[in-house]
Image: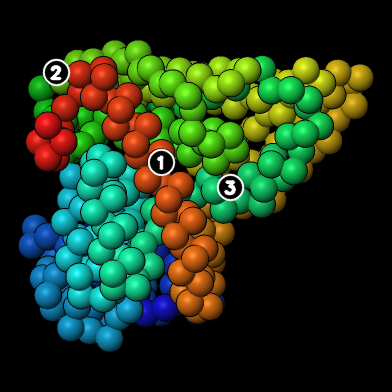
Amino acid sequence: MKLGIIGSGLIVQEFLPRLIGLDGMEVLAIQGAPGSKQQIEKLCEENNIPHALIDFEELCQLEIDTVYVAVPNFLHFDYCKKALEKGLNVIVEKPMTSNATEAKILKQIAMEKECFLFEAVTTLYFAGYQKIKEWLPEIGTVKLVKCNYSQYSRRYDAFRNGEVLPAFDPNKSGGALMDLNLYNLHFVMGLFGKPEEVKYYANIERGIDTSGTLILNYEGFIAECTAAKDCSAPYSFVIQGTNGYIKTAFPPNLIGKITLHKNDGSEKEYDDGMFMNRLIPEFNYFISCIERNDLEACLKKLDESITVSEIQTEARLNAGIIFPADQQIF
């Protein structure tokens, strides 16, 4: 994979040293906004990346085959669309797009161009997540699922003081549902599929959800997904069944150690040890798929992302949270 990175924010800064060390990966450039040129040059120098750019067209003229889109949410669609139309594979940070309509448009272009399109959601690629799938039958009939990913954001302090950063800006597709609760959604729907009904109860300030709880109704059980950026709480992810429960040590973007507790008192534990390197499993998967030209595997993951986006979009709109990108829906 010859990779061009679009964006130079915190997630890129955190993961870049690990990315450049992956087998099958060659990072050729970072492209960002003109105002971030100095930061891009510094990142490239520190990580031996040959090109620091501020122009997308210039990036595409390099010998790259894949772009990693790591910019604010509202820019995802445009960058992904432009890259796919040029025949480039795309890895885009979650959420893939502002709404499900945009996600479906990108899927159509990717299929026409026979390009790979992946949403980067760390949850789905951990060995610990696969172990949870393996253990599910052991807890009997599932009755309740409870997830809480609450993490006080320093950006909320700015928001309260009148400074609206992208994380809390409805014009930039922000909010708790689009960020932390998306991990909860992928975790639950990756295990149980699409719910029969969804309802979002949100704390809304100035048109954006600073925290909220999603209720997903499945046949025979309820999943409760809570996420907050305006308050904090211990991380919690528990699947409760008639024969026992499964819990994780960390939130769904990390998972960490998982425990299976049976009603008879017996326990099993598993830890894949990857919570400190959460990007590695997903990027290894992306590299492998592209090297094998396994478009079928990519399409399966893409369809899962679109289904999650459909539920997320429905919940958000029903709660009255509207983004500029939603104009195409109405």
Nearest the camera: 164 or 303? 303
Kindly report the distance in space between the C-alpha atoms of the residues bearing marks 1 and 3: 26 Å
How many neighbours does mark 1 have within 10 angstroms: few (below 14), some (14-19), or many (20 or more)?
some
Tell me the element at label 2.
loop
Which is nearer the N-term, disc 3 or disc 2? 2
Tell me the element at label 1.
helix
Tell me the element at label 3.
helix
How many neighbours does mark 2 have within 10 angstroms: few (below 14), some (14-19), or many (20 or more)?
few
Q: Position of residue 232 (x, y in %)?
A: 43, 20
Proximity of marks 3 and 2: CB atoms separated by less than 8 Å: no
Image quadrant occupied by the N terminus: bottom left
Q: Nearer the viewer, mark 2 or mark 1?
A: 1
Whether residue 183 is visible to the viewer of this picture, yes or no, is: yes
Numbered tag placed on residue 275 in the rendering? 3
For disc 1, the marked residue is 307
Q: Position of residue 276 (x, y in %)?
A: 56, 50
Q: Position of residue 286 (x, y in %)?
A: 48, 66
What residue is shown at x 68% (from left), y 28% (from top)? Answer: 247
What residue is shown at x 28% (from left), y 41% (from top)? Answer: 100
What residue is shown at x 86% (from left), y 18% (from top)? Answer: 263
Image quadrant occupied by the C terminus: top left
What amino acid is at disc 3? Phe
How many neighbours does mark 3 have within 10 angstroms: few (below 14), some (14-19), or many (20 or more)?
some
Outermost residue on the bottom side: it is 63
Numbered tag placed on residue 206 in the rendering? 2
What amino acid is at disc 2? Arg
Q: Nearer the viewer, mark 1 or mark 3?
A: 1
Which is nearer the N-term, disc 2 or disc 1? 2
The quadrant in which residue 320 appears is top left
Specify whether 127 is left or right of 288: right
Proximity of marks 2 and 1: CB atoms separated by less than 8 Å: no
Kindly report the distance in space between the C-alpha atoms of the residues bearing marks 3 and 2: 34 Å
